[in-house]
């Protein structure tokens, strides 16, 4: 099963690290990409760089900034292929954001080929 691991770092947690502390944390993120279960992932720029598009009467409304004002901002993600949720949890526990006070949301991806209709 494929899972999306949505990383919500604690605000300011990574910026508070000294260069000596940040190096191993960054290396841990990069090492996860070498795990054969990892299909891809990326570190996202800060939420204030986002552009949000919404439906509006007569067209669409395009605004600067994230979809919602919240303390938890999506900071990055991995997509993995795991045997089951326990396997996905094992991978997830290695993501540095967790030990730095953040959270990771694990969500199974929809298998579009198995769906009758979208």
Image (spheres, helix red, strand yellow):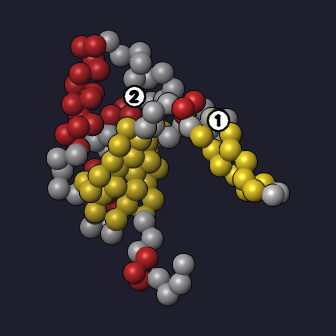
Residue at coordinates 33% horizontally, 48% vertically from top-left? 41
Residue at label 2? Answer: 100
Q: Which residue lies furthest to the bottom in this view?
A: 116
Counting from the top left corner in percent of width and height, residue 75 is at 45, 37
- Camera-nearest residue between 28 and 56: 56
Q: Quadrant of the C terminus?
A: bottom right
**Crowding near pointer 2: few (<14 within 10 Å), some, many (20+)?**
some
- Camera-nearest residue between 98 and 45: 45
**Crowding near pointer 1: few (<14 within 10 Å), some, many (20+)?**
few
Counting from the top left corner in percent of width and height, residue 67 is at 64, 43
Residue at coordinates 22% horizontally, 57% vertically from top-left? 37
Residue at coordinates 28% horizontally, 13% vertically from top-left? 19
Residue at label 1? Answer: 64
Counting from the top left corner in percent of width and height, residue 72 is at 56, 36
Alpha carbon distance from label 2 to label 1: 28 Å
- Give the left or right position of residue 14, taking residue 74 as reference: left
Instruction: Determine which quarter of the picture holds residue 82.
Output: bottom left
Sequence-wise, the earlier of marks 2 and 1 is 1
- Give the left or right position of residue 71, taking residue 37 as reference: right
């Amino acid at each position: 099963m494929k899972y999306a691991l949505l990383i919500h770092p604690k605000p300011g947690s990574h910026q508070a690290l000294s260069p000596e502390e940040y190096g191993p944390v960054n290396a841990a993120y990069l090492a996860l990409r070498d795990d054969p279960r990892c299909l891809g992932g990326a570190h996202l720029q800060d939420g204030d760089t986002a552009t949000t598009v919404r439906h509006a009467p007569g067209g669409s409304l395009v605004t600067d900034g994230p979809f919602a004002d919240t303390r938890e901002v999506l900071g990055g993600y991995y997509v993995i292929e795991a045997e089951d949720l326990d396997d996905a949890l094992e991978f997830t526990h290695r993501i540095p954001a967790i030990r730095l006070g953040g959270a990771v949301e694990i969500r199974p991806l929809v298998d579009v080929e198995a769906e009758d209709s979208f």
